[in-house]
Amino acid sequence: MKTLVVTGASRGVGFEICNQAAAKGHTVIALSRNISPLMGIPNVRPFSVDLSSELEVVDFVKQVSHSFKSVDALINNAGSMIKKPFLEITSSEFEAVFKVNVFAVASLTRLMLPMMNHKGHVLNITSMGGVQGSVKFPGLSAYSSSKGALIILTELLAEEFKESGPSFNALALGAVQTEMLEEAFPGYQAPVTAVQMADYIIDFAFNGHQFYNGKVLPLSSSTP
């Protein structure tokens, strides 16, 4: 059995990752601002953390380092989305999206690295919206550009730690039926459920780095 850290754990794909991994007997360290949906799930250790606050991230790592010696996988799944026309979005709103989608990933990963199994895997969940050449949607300038930055960060960290480990990869998700998707595109029905996507992500987090490092894999049935 392995130990994994999952951010954005209270709903959508993140919640299903926690639920399914825990049901398989793995130990799940689950981060979310709202941890009430995670309470009482066997093998899940929930921590209330606001990822946009580096002080809270630092405090979390201090807490968890006392209880766990090693982490096998870190799944940076948390995401923030604001859907607004570019001329209407404020600088503070743009920055808030980047704080969660890029800066928090960098901070948490840097602080967790001393605990990471050197043969482990840091898996960043990005979006097809951040992939060059993919279909883009109006109103998602902050979200898609932040997810593009996360892709580049993944590639850079894989290069920097290729000799010592752990491995770094990113999965670029297409449309998945989650609360975030419903909020951004009301009424749209995605071809993939959160349960299906979580099952794939868990398997990739524990096994994908045997075959990939520094790669961005698009998970979308559409072209481009």
Image (cartoon, rainbow, N blue to C red):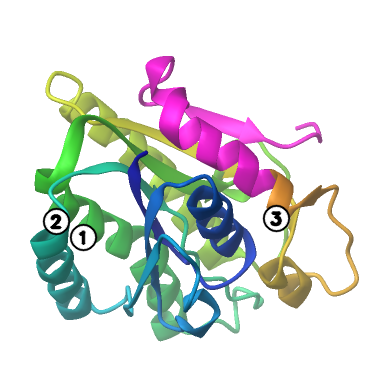
Q: Which mark is residue 111?
A: 2
Q: In which quarter of the image is the N terminus?
A: top left
Residue plotted at (52% across, 45% down): 24
Q: Where is residue 121 in the image (x, y as percent from the top left)?
A: 33, 34
Which mark lies nearer to you, 1 or 2? 2
Total numbered labels placed on residues in the image = 3
**In the image, residue 8 lies at what x, y percent?**
47, 66
Q: What stretch is highlighted in magenta?
A: 197-224
Amino acid bearing label 1: Ser
Residues at discs 1 and 2 in contact (Cβ within 8 Å): yes
Residue 194, which numbered label? 3
Is-magenta flag for residue 200?
yes
Circle number at residue 107: 1
Query: How far, Cα to Cα, is label 1 from label 2?
Result: 6 Å
Task: Please tell me how crowded label 2 is: few (under 14), some (14-19), or many (20+) other residues with Cα within 10 Å.
Answer: some
Badge 3 marks a residue whose secondary structure is helix
Look at label 3 and name its amino acid.
Ala
Q: What residue type is labelled 2?
A: Leu
Magenta stretch: includes residue 221:
yes
Q: Which of 41 and 144 is in front in this view?
A: 41
- How many neighbours does mark 1 have within 10 angstroms: few (below 14), some (14-19), or many (20 or more)? some
Where on the picture, by quarter, is residue 101? bottom left
